[in-house]
Amino acid sequence: QVQLVESGGGLVQPGGSLRLSCAASASIATIYRMAWYRQAPGKQRELVSSITREGSINYADSVKGRFTISRDNAKNTVFLQMSGLKPEDTAVYYCYAWPNNYIPQNYWGQGTQVTVSS
């Protein structure tokens, strides 16, 4: 069982920045893959960015060059630094963990709201 708690969401103006945090109850150094997803009203949940245990990173095309995923293994926390925010980035952002790539079990946080508006 892995518990994930997101924080750092809020209201920001277009062009602004936010940093989301995801604190895990387990050692993230051993977790196969962690990721950030988002879901806007009326839309499907989509992958924003992911990072594997080995450090492989990928981003959705819509956020490349603006968002950066990172992790602090000592704090069991994954971050999503978001800059150049656009109104279309408005969504609930969810943290995701897939601890073992041989076991199809994953975990989600409760989500944090990000609203980009002037």
Image (cartoon, rainbow, N blue to C red):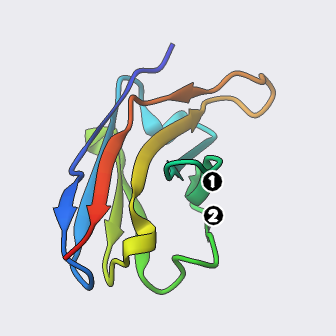
Residue that numbered label 1 is attached to: 46
- Left or right? Give the position of 77 relative to 28: left
- Left or right? Give the position of 78 relative to 41: left
Residue 64 picture quarter: bottom right
Residue that numbered label 2 is attached to: 56
Query: Relative to residue 33, is residue 27 depicted above or below?
Result: above
Q: Earlier in the sequence, mark 2 or mark 1?
A: 1
Provide residue 7's location: percent of width, then percent of height.
23, 43
- Left or right? Give the position of 5 relative to 103: left
Disc 2 residue type (three-letter): Ser
Residue nearer the viewer, 29 or 106: 106
Q: CA distance from mark 2 to mark 1?
A: 19 Å
Residue 115 showing in the rendered view: yes
Q: Quadrant of the C terminus?
A: bottom left
Residue nearer the viewer, 51 or 46: 46
Residue 10 picture quarter: bottom left
Tally the marks.
Answer: 2
Pointer 1: residues within 10 angstroms few (<14), some, or many (20+)? some
Question: Regarding mark 2 in the picture, which secondary structure is present there?
Answer: loop
Provide residue 43's location: percent of width, then percent of height.
61, 51
Residue 12 picture quarter: bottom left
Provide residue 27's location: percent of width, then percent of height.
42, 31
Identify the residue at horizontal 75%, vertical 34% (top origin).
Answer: 101
- Left or right? Give the position of 23 relative to 102: left
Residue 54 showing in the rendered view: no
Q: Which of the numbered marks, if any, corresponds to residue 104?
A: none
Question: Regarding mark 1 in the picture, which secondary structure is present there?
Answer: strand
Disc 1 residue type (three-letter): Glu
Identify the residue at horizontal 55%, vertical 35% (top origin).
Answer: 97
Pointer 2: residues within 10 angstroms few (<14), some, or many (20+)? few
Identify the residue at horizontal 64%, vertical 78% (top origin).
Answer: 61
Provide residue 67's location: percent of width, then percent of height.
42, 74
